[in-house]
Image (tube, rainbow, N blue to C red):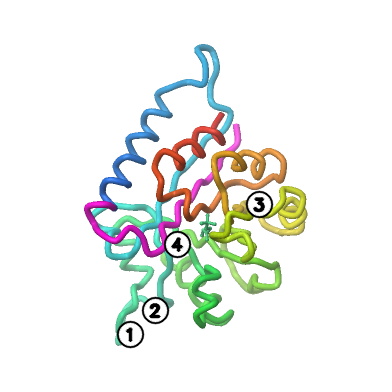
């Protein structure tokens, strides 16, 4: 039985807390239901799936969610508008996305990302470093981090990376826990796990539709 990580990146969605609560609760209930239903009478699920949900910061406390989309590299101080790793830890967050390409595109640099990973590890949270090429991995990180391969051309485009290409990237990554992200849906999810050899998925658009997100979870668990 493999351990898989399925991560929902809600990005800057939904617009209201009431909608966020509805989405979150329907995903939670759906997961419970999946866990209580065996694929068939005599069978067990073949993979154990841990689900991480990363809503916008402002919804984290209300939802008691376990994932964040970013954080700053200092724990406190005069850094207007920033959120620290310690603050995230204090409200129950376990995983933090770092270096998402949508942040890099708006000016987040390699140095900033490097500092963020180290700060997250230092407080005992798990960073998920998002990259679209291996050269984006800092060399001097001490500690375990999760890698997420998200080719930019596949993000939010409906044009997922081919299984062959993603498999090559997976093989070349010197990390034993690598997620794939980019136009994942319930049709292609299992291929990235079974054929390309990833340990999980980082899901944007499809994670905003609870039924589709739950189908993905169920498909990779069986
Ligand atoms: P999509 O699943 O919408 O392509 O987004 C992927 C992503 O950026 C997750 O971090």
- Residue 222 shows up from this direction: yes
Residue of label 4: 96
The percent coordinates of residue 137 (x first, y second) are 65, 70
The percent coordinates of residue 167 (x first, y second) are 74, 50
The percent coordinates of residue 135 (x first, y second) are 70, 72
Q: Name the one closer to the observer, 86 or 58.
A: 58
User: Of label 2 and label 1, which has the lower sequence position?
Assistant: 2
Residue of label 1: 79
Q: Above or below — where is 178 with respect to 219? A: below
Residue at point 62%, 66% (across, down): 152
User: Of label 3 and label 4, which has the lower sequence position?
Assistant: 4
User: Of label 1 and label 3, which has the lower sequence position?
Assistant: 1
Q: Calculate the distance from the C-alpha at mark 4 to the C-alpha at mark 1.
A: 19 Å
- Residue 144 shows up from this direction: no
Pointers 4 and 2 in contact (C-beta within 8 Å) = no
SS at mark 1?
loop
Q: Calculate the distance from the C-alpha at mark 3 to the C-alpha at mark 4.
A: 18 Å
The percent coordinates of residue 113 (x first, y second) are 53, 75
Farthest residue toward the bottom? 78
User: Of label 3 and label 2, which has the lower sequence position?
Assistant: 2
Q: Residues within 10 Å of mark 3 (few under 14, many from 20)?
A: few
Q: Quadrant of residue 54?
A: bottom left
Q: Nearer the viewer, mark 2 or mark 1?
A: 1
Q: Name the one closer to the observer, 93 or 15.
A: 15
Q: Nearer the viewer, mark 4 or mark 2?
A: 4
Residue of label 2: 74
Looking at the rendering, the stretch of residues picked out in magenta corresponds to 1-19
Residue of label 3: 176
Q: Quadrant of the C terminus?
A: top right
Residue at point 33%, 58% (across, down): 14
Farthest residue toward the front? 158
């Amino acid at each position: 039985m493999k351990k898989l990580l399925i991560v929902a990146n809600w990005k800057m969605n939904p617009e209201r807390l009431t909608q966020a609560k509805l989405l979150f609760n329907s995903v939670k209930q759906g997961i419970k239901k999946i866990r209580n239903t065996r694929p068939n009478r005599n069978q067990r699920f073949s993979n154990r799936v841990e689900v991480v949900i990363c809503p916008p910061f402002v919804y984290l406390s209300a939802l008691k969610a376990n994932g964040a989309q970013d954080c700053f590299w200092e724990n406190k101080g005069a850094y207007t508008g920033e959120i620290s790793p310690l603050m995230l830890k204090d409200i129950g967050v376990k995983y933090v996305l770092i270096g998402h390409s949508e942040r890099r595109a708006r000016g987040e640099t390699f140095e900033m990302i490097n500092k963020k990973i180290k700060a997250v590890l230092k407080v005992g949270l798990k960073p998920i470093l998002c990259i679209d090429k291996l050269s984006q991995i800092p060399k001097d990180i001490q500690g375990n981090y999760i890698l997420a391969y998200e080719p930019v051309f596949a993000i939010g485009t409906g044009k997922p990376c081919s299984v062959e290409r993603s498999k090559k990237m997976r093989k070349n990554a010197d990390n034993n826990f690598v997620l794939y992200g980019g136009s994942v849906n319930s049709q292609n999810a299992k291929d990235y796990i079974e054929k390309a050899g990833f340990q999980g998925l980082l899901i944007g658009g499809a994670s905003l539709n609870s039924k589709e997100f739950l189908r993905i979870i169920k498909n990779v668990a069986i």
